[in-house]
Each structure stands twice: as structure tokens, then as C-alpha cells.
Image (tube, helix red, strand yellow):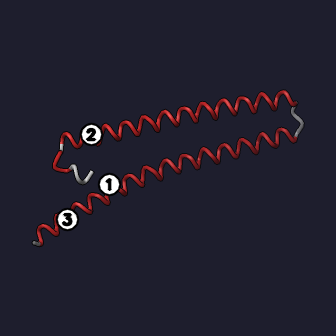
Amino acid sequence: MPESRLQKLWKESERYSTDIKEKETDNNVFRKQIREIKATIHQTQRDYHATAKGTSKAENQRIKMQKLLKRQKLANEVNAQEKEIAELRLELKRLSKKTFPQFDDTL
């Protein structure tokens, strides 16, 4: 009886370990997003100060367009990477189930 309890606790510990790893990766993604947002804010502040100094309207529009294109390009890249990560996770689960069918209920 104690052995089965120990096995249950071990499985629960493994599940929590995987949950922790997933949360850590999520936190890393959030930290990266925070850095990107801070950089965007800093750039916006610089642009605001440059505008306040009297740069031309055409120059401001060109700068805004460049930022918009850069932001869109980064957003597209992020979306593509998120899709790829999701596909890779599904593939990993599929291969894990195929390789280790006895662990199918824990995944």
C-alpha cells in the first residue's frame, strides 16, 4: 500500500515539475514581451521629443511608417514562431505517446 502511495506522489511530483517548466517558459516569453514593450515606449518617447524639436512632417511620417513596418514584421515573425512552437509541442506529445504509451495518462 505505501508503495502505491509513493508512486502516486512521484507521478504528482513529475506533473508539478513539468508544470513548473511550462510556467518558466511562459515567464521567459512574458519577460521578452516586457523588454520589447519598454523598447517601444522608449522609441516612442524619443520620437515625441524629436517631433517637439521641430522635425518636418514628411520626416515624421517616414519614421512612423518605418516603425509601423518594423512592428508588423516583428508581429508576423512572432506569430510564425508561436505557430511553429505549438506544432512542435503537438509533435512532441504525439511522439511521447507513441514511444511511451504507459505514460499516456500523465501527458
Q: Give the Cα separation between the discs numbered 2 and 3.
A: 24 Å
From the viewer's perspective, is 100 left or right of 17? left
Image spot of residue 44 (x, y percent): 74, 42
Q: Which residue is mark 2?
A: 94
Q: Which residue is mark 3?
A: 8
Mark 2 touches mark 3? (CB < 8 Å): no
Q: Secondary structure at mark 2?
A: helix
At x 16%, y 69%, the residue is 5
Image spot of residue 28 (x, y percent): 47, 49
Quarter of the figure with residue 16: bottom left
Mark 2 touches mark 1? (CB < 8 Å): no
Q: Residue furthest right?
A: 54
Mark 1 touches mark 3? (CB < 8 Å): no
> Residue type at mark 2?
Arg
Q: Give the Cα separation between the discs numbered 1 and 3.
A: 15 Å
Image spot of residue 50 (x, y percent): 82, 39
> Residue type at mark 3?
Lys
Task: Compare residues 63 and 84 and report the one nearer the observer.
Answer: 84
At x 53%, y 32%, the residue is 77
Please give the count of numbered marks on the rendered protein. 3
Q: Which residue is mark 1?
A: 18
Q: Earlier in the sequence, mark 2 or mark 3?
A: 3
Q: Residues within 10 Å of mark 2 (few under 14, many from 20)?
A: some
Q: Secondary structure at mark 1?
A: helix
